[in-house]
Image: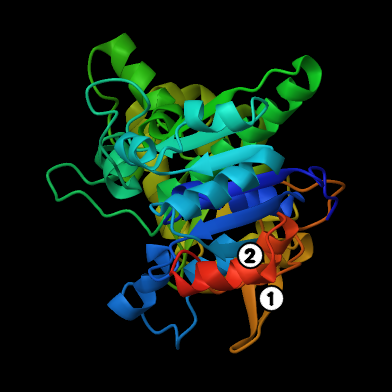
Amino acid sequence: MLKVLDGVRLIEAAEWFFVPGAGTVLADWGVDVVKIEHPTRGDPLRGLISSGMVPGASGLNFFIENGSRNKRSIGLDLAAERGREILYKMVEKADVFLTSFLPAARRRLKIDVDDLRKINPKLIYAKGSGQGPKGPEAERGGFDAGSFWSRGGVAHMLSEPGKAPIMQRAAFGDTIGATFIAGGIAAALYHREKTGQATTVDVSLLGTACWLMAPDILGAIVLGRDLPHSDRSRAPNPLMNTYLCQDGKWLMLMMLTPMRHWDEFCKAIEREDLLQEYPLMKWIDEQVRFQLVDVLNKHFATRSRLEWMDRLLKYDTIHAPVQTPTEIRNDPQVLANGYLVDYTHPQHGPFKVASSPVQFNAEPTDVRRVAPEVGQDTEDILLDHGLSWEEIAKLKEGGVIA
């Protein structure tokens, strides 16, 4: 993959997945990412495998492998004065400082934007938060299931009315927000290149949800009430709906413009009689649309999803299988585009990680380095910043580094 940001140096003082995920994307793009971890505790994301949050992983923490590939790790205690001095030395050569630490922690550790800009005025300072950098809850932390999924309206709009809210999938909001942070940092680097001015970059999980849920939020503002929940039996457009096939698998039709696709669709499913019985001019009547959904329900139940897809692909139709994660790993489009990348773990052997979503010259992500252990690269990083072996030994003896 083309390393469009080769030569950029980034210091990552961040934990879990939301903010470190941005470091992963940037590392894929060629940035030299140094991940700072506490010398004994490390990133708490590493502990999920022992807490049972990563079930059946056989010792392989795929969260860490996917979120720390192509990075180097330094075990460094930022609460120790000597540890902070080392960070300051690293900041002198850095282009970007990326953090998930809360404002109080940044002030206590003396790593806030003003502290680091005194050392390097050209430093881009990027941070991710739960609720944003302003407002009454700016000092509070947040995880994506709360700040993004619940507070941002995603859970409400995807849950069945009258029933308990559905839980989000792991790191769902984190991965989306991480990509926004990476894009913001790339834009800040471009701005600095043009103007010489360093900027701060802020992305919050709540702000990410507001962007993703904009159609629902803006619709509510205009109408004065929430938009209705989806009901597939009463789809306003029968060609934008899911249908259960004979083999128990679902198929999603996604044809936004029925006038373009209706004739072709009827040919594809061998039901040209529907053109006469349900002409588009009658679709203005919602009862006609609901009847058509029922007709299509019965018809799609007569063949397997694969059979339907084979037919639909021969015509001008837009559709997609509703796939399980197990099915996605064998999707021909996923394989052809390298959306899952081969990865060989030194202890666990062949594995795969998810490619970050942006490609340059249609080249998928390549894994240059597997995820490091805590402090795996400490000595190399410190030597690169001018420390001697004697100094490194003393720091290790004092528990400042790992």
Residue displayed at 42% across by 37% down = 110
Residue 298 coordinates in the image, percent (x, y): 41, 58
Q: Nearer the viewer, mark 2 or mark 1?
A: 2
Q: Which mark is residue 69?
A: 2
Classify residue 35 as left or right of residue 169.
right
Asked if labels 1 and 2 touch by Cβ distance under 8 angstroms, the answer is yes
Residue displayed at 29% across by 28% down = 138
* Residue 88 seen in the figure: yes
In the displayed structure, 347 sits above or below 402; it is: below
Which quadrant of the figure has residue 318?
top right
* Residue 242 seen in the figure: no
Quadrant of the drawing holding the N terminus = bottom right
Q: Nearer the viewer, residue 2 or 364?
A: 2
Name the residue that disc number 1 marks: 343
Residue 281 coordinates in the image, percent (x, y): 51, 22
Residue 238 coordinates in the image, percent (x, y): 46, 39
What's the amino acid at mark 2? Arg
Helix, strand or loop status at disc 2: loop
Classify residue 343 as left or right of residue 283.
right
Residue 174 coordinates in the image, percent (x, y): 44, 48
Q: Earlier in the sequence, mark 2 or mark 1?
A: 2
In the displayed structure, 246 sits above or below 222; it is: below
